[in-house]
Image (cartoon, coloured by chain):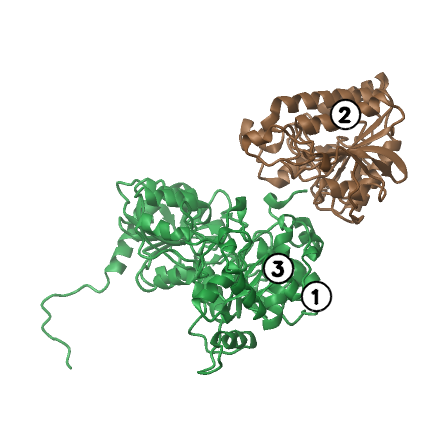
Chain colours: A green, B brown
Amino acid sequence: MTAPTDRTTKRAWDTAQRSRDERLAAASRYARGKIVDAADTTKLLEAIVRPGDRVCLEGDNQKQADFLASRLAEVAPAIINNLHIVQSGIVLPEHLDLFALGIAKKLDFSYSGPQSVTLARALKGGKIELGAVHTYLELFSRYFIDLTPQVALTVARCADRDGNLYMGPNTEDSPVVIEATAFKQGIVVAQVNEVVDKVPRVDVAGDRVDFIVVTPSPFYVEPLFTRDPAQITETQILGAMLAIKGIYEPYGVKRLNHGIGFNTAAIELILPTFAERLGLKGKIATHFALNPHPTLIPAIENGWVEQIHSFGSEVGMDDYMRARPDIFFTGRDGSMSSNRMYCQAAGLYATDLFIGSTLQIDLQGNSSTFTRDRIAGFGGAPNMGSDPHGRRHASAPWLKAGREASGDGHGLPRGRKLVVQIVETFGEKLVPTFVENLDSIELAKALDLALPPVMIYGDDVTHIVTEEGIANLLLCRTPYEREQAIRGVAGYTDVGRARDRKAVEELRARKVIQRPEDLGIDVLDANRSLLAARSVKDLMHWSGDLYDPPRKFRNW
Amino acid sequence: MNDMPEARVSDSASWFLSTARERIAGLLDHGSFMEFLPPTERVQSPHLALFDLPVAFDDGVIVGRGRLAGRDVLIAAQEGQFMGGTFAEVSGAKLLGLIRAARDNDKLPRAILLLLDSGGVRLQEANAGELAVAEVMRAIMEARMAGVAVIALVGGRAGAFGGAGLTAATCSRIAISEQGRTGVSGPEVIETNKGVEEFDSKDKALVWSVTGGRNRRLIGGADAYAEDTVSGFREAASSLIDRAPTFDLATLQAEQQRLSARVERFANCSTAAEMWRVLGITAPQSIRDMNDAAFVKIVADVKEASHDGR
């Protein structure tokens, strides 16, 4: 085939580049080199952002480009409007102000945390056109396919004059956001705490960064993964004992991810006590895809943990991680390096178990943290809590779970990821965790969503742990057995009381359901003396005073 | 009377995390506690049902007598985890009855231990609660005049605020732990009334630096610093009973003088660390993270911490 020679129309192949050049020209009056005075930030944004742009305003799980967020909320809606916000975290009030002020219109996101109630209200009020709620990996992937940002507003601890950025332990989403934006002719603006002659290490190369703004005060980071051991209940400790003795031990789970919450914090804190007495050190919980949870410090100090790769960081853990490079991934400068995209992929493909909590579980085992008036988003849990069909390497726990799922042993050997939901039968304010129907189905109808938001699908869940025992869903052979296995650990909730007692007893005889006594656990042993640390201050002392707890946790 | 078997509570159990009953069981000599109006009597709040709220069979206050390291004592403990350990009609009357009994009957033990753990008055029974606080304060004064040593032990999760803070200040002596907090207006109350700029109640480091045990001990707001264990409070309580001042005009004048001097001395301080510097502590920033032993050493050199008032 030969190329056409008589082209009648001449297509321009560099429109994005031209648009970028125009924007840079308009912005040049506010910049000296790459540096922009903080006072000119709003004008800078008016020069580089165009109506209808896709904008990523990080917006991460922990760190926030808070200064750029408040300046973007100050642009004139007459000049800049109809923005399409594409970022993982809707965390700051300003993120939603953009919609109330008429600056932004469409939203694709992943996690909303503290703004979940306001977001639900804004959606119901028709202020926001919602694209979809994503998992992290899913949203990051779409940055390269159909949601590539025209403008990325990022945040770093410091920059040099060439725009090289140092993000330190809170690298988080930035590398993927900037990669997608910069290489598709977009514009990258970074807010930094300071400009230095030489950054401690280059987390993002300067030629991907167009403008630097030094902010009047350091950026905000939420200590999202700190759980005060003082608030862990005996019920949560019982759940942790069940998980260790009923799942970690028999499957020999070494590579894993812990979801956020007090249930998993309890597991971390009884590794050096309960699990140590069971002789499990070195046999379970050695390799983690995990944020640097302060509650893991005692297990690390006692030699339980071999290595941890992290999605993000945690406030106060910098010095501790720097002093434990054998455990954490650290740069040549000594500080930890996180990367949400890498760690999500690692948690999806290279761990054998995910364990996490949730707000609601239905009779099929589907779970959700969305309720009628709360859109919490997904974050990473749906990826961590799913069986990756693209996995091809074997491991003992993965094969054992696969054998249990296949039952008869015929057909090709397959593996299964262990996906464990650990909950109390009644959650906060005595709201039942087990329900006939998820609230999120109602919510999907009310908001006209194409897909009811489900955090973890029932067919991915392998075990449910409550204070009443463990239901092993891998061993259920019919939908009825599955339903009764769930009812059989649902305690005194309506769902639990409606169990078929005979069926539940049969399931128990087959070890589909295991009660604490079936596992040799005395519920009276579930008390706080099992916790290796009982307060935040204990954690600090375990760390040799390297852990510097955030002010809101310093109750001394 | 209470004939339920008493659970053993270990000496190293955290006072902060223990329940009121665990604190009593651990503090007193094993088997010596005798409860007045135990839960089996169901002397409980007549008001909470109106609000569709659960009651406690002891209304959140336990009163009785027992032995502390061999010495006869009366004892009262507030359960901070029941409605914030609040002063209310029934719980207030139990406390008041105990103190008045000591005032009026010199056959009873000459020491009362008040294990305070309360945010103040129970709002659902506010009038009765306020009256109870006033009556308790008066009864403590009268009991002290009759020669009874009244010792406040502060180290629970609710702290000792509002009426409990006032009650503590009325006692002969106060023992506090690092995690203990005391004051009149609680952090949330100050924030609500004066704004978050004045006092951020969620900033625990700030809250504890002002109201917490270490600051209270350093500026003489408490007379003994206890390790956060059952045995720590037992030692502190025993030594304070021995050191309880006579309640007379001289003591009151000494107290007045001490408090006036404190107001003057710290007038220009806007943070706890500044006060600690005024007290002559060379590295005030290190006060909070150091261990108990190091802190006790520093307290020994601070003049304000020991006094002849109260």
Please name the residue that numbered disc 2 is placed on. Answer: B97
Identity, as a three-letter code, of the amino acid under mark 3: Ala
Residue B290 percent across, percent down from the top left: 74, 46
Q: Tell me, for residue A240, which label it has, or none.
A: 3
Disc sitting over residue B22 in the figure: none
Disc 1 and disc 2 in contact, CB within 8 angstroms: no
Q: Position of residue A167 (x, y in %)?
A: 50, 56
Q: Quadrant of residue A276?
A: bottom right
Give whichever of A399, A175 is nearer the camera: A399
| Inter-mark Cα distance, 2 to 3 | 45 Å
**Amino acid identity at mark 1:** Glu
Residue at far top of view? B249
Identify the residue shown where x is 27% and y is 47%. Answer: A82
Name the image quarter holding residue A69.
Answer: top left
- The N terminus of chain A lies in quadrant: bottom left
- The relative height of residue A171 versus residue B130 in the rendered view (above or below) is below
The crowd level at tag 3 (other Cα within 10 Å; few <14, some 14-19, many 20+) is many
> Do the dots labelled 3 and 1 sit on one chain?
yes
Task: Kindly state the secondary structure of the residue where label 2 is placed.
Answer: helix
Depth order, front residue of A72/A420? A420
Q: Is residue A108 left or right of residue A269?
A: left
Give the numbered dot on residue A276.
1
Residue B19 to residue B263: above or below: below
Residue B235 rendering spot, x and y as whole percentages: 84, 40
Residues at discs 2 and 3 both on one chain: no
Chain assignment, label 3:
A
Quarter of the image for the C terminus of chain A: give it: top right
